[in-house]
Image (cartoon, helix red, strand yellow):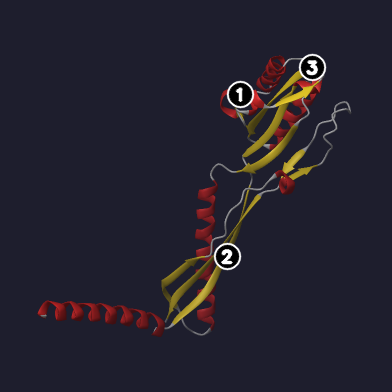
Amino acid sequence: MKKLLTALVVIIMSVSTGYSQEKNFIDQNYISVNGYNQMKVTPNRIYINFTIDENDTKGRTSLADLEKRMISALQGLGIDVATQLTVKDLSSSYKKYVLKRQDVKQSKEYELVVYDAKNVADVFTAMESIGLANAGISRAEHSDILNYKLESKVQAVQNAREKAQALAQALGQDIGKAIYILDNERMYTPYTNTVMLRSTASFDMAVEDSMPQIEFQDITLDSNVTVYFELK
């Protein structure tokens, strides 16, 4: 019985302490502000999906020969196919067939990563020159996006402090340490080509010397935080 009473006393004291700390936090003078920062990041990883298909040559060129042409064209651009080129769907290499008049036409899907807009233009031009037109941009991102997000949040906190300081000084007061920080993070979704791609020229390679001039919109990082500061 004595042990039970002791346990109850400990629980009551713990609850009282917690309530007291919460009450002290609510009762003290503080100022609450939102801090905001927007950062623009230029993509440095652009993904191109394309398909090599025997149907593009009406069966006159085998899949193996098309693949050799494709690899040779990419290597001619200085692309490291061992690290930048991957088979997007391995099963499609063997199971994706187009049947026509008992002829079997094979196709193979790839994903290529390049690092700037000029690389993209060069790849599209090279693909068209060897008769491979089934190419498109799937997404673009930055390899160090998490560090950029953190940097943006830090600047948002600094913005909150500047705002709190200005508001407090307008009342002849000052701010103390931060007593509460809330990160109002939004889910980051890499942009796709439907919203990123800006082309200043057509991809119509039928026009001699036509070179697509491609630019990518920057990735926009919006950071928003709520910070409570002591008000002195």
Residue at image x 68%, y 40%?
A: 138
**SS for dot 2:** strand
User: Is any atom of residue 178 visible in this view?
Assistant: yes
Q: Nearer the viewer, residue 229 or 221?
A: 221
x and y percentages locating residue 131 in the rendered image: 79, 22
Q: CB of mark 1 within 8 Å of CB of mark 3?
A: no
Tell me if mark 3 has few (under 14), some (14-19) or many (20+) residues whose alpha carbon lies within 10 angstroms of its own: some
Front tag of 1 and 3 = 3
For disc 3, the marked residue is 59
In the rendered picture of this protein, how many numbered marks are placed on residues?
3
x and y percentages locating residue 210 in the rendered image: 85, 30
Q: Is residue 181 shown left or right of residue 194?
A: left
Residue at image x 77%, y 25%?
A: 132
Question: In the picture, which quadrant includes the C terminus?
Answer: bottom left
Earlier in the chain: of badge 3 and badge 2, it is 2
| Cα–Cα gap, marks 1 and 3 | 25 Å
For disc 1, the marked residue is 81
Earlier in the chain: of badge 1 and badge 2, it is 2
